Amino acid sequence: MLFLFSKLCYIVNVLGQLFVLNRVLSTRYSTFGVDMMKHLISDSDWTEDTNYVAFPRVTLCDFKVRSRE
């Protein structure tokens, strides 16, 4: 019985965090996966959608490292 209660608490925690994330960032992260699949199927650019501004557009920065010469 304790095991089932702890798993129920995990589920409530996950759903609560998704709700808080949606409210704090004012976005629709609960439907993010479904929306991305729609963008992939319709061949539209997901970066133009303003609902996903919290995700980074660039994930790699180019910078020079000093050589030891």
Image: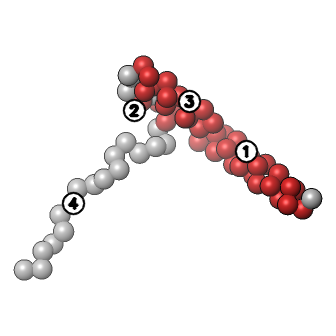
**The one of 36 and 26 positioned closer to us in this rendering:** 36
Left or right of residue 66: residue 43: right
Q: Are marks 1 and 3 in contact (CB under 8 Å)?
A: no
Q: Type of residue at label 4?
A: Phe
- In the image, residue 66 sits, relative to residue 55, either above or below, namely below
| Mark toward the start of the polypeptide (3 vs 4) | 3
Left or right of residue 18: residue 44: left
Q: Type of residue at label 2?
A: Thr
Neighbor class of circle 2 (other Cα within 10 Å; few <14, some 14-19, many 20+) is: few
Question: Residue 65 sits in which quadrant?
Answer: bottom left
Question: Which mark, by number, is residue 63?
Answer: 4
Question: What kind of element bears circle 2?
Answer: helix
Which residue corresponds to mark 2? Answer: 47
From the viewer's perspective, is the residue at label 3 or at label 4 nearer?
A: 3
| Mark toward the start of the polypeptide (2 vs 3) | 3
Residue found 47% across the figure and 38% down from its top: 53
Which residue corresponds to mark 1? Answer: 15
Which residue corresponds to mark 3? Answer: 34
Distance between the Cα atoms at labels 3 and 4?
Answer: 36 Å
Q: Is residue 2 visible?
A: yes
Q: Type of residue at label 3?
A: Val
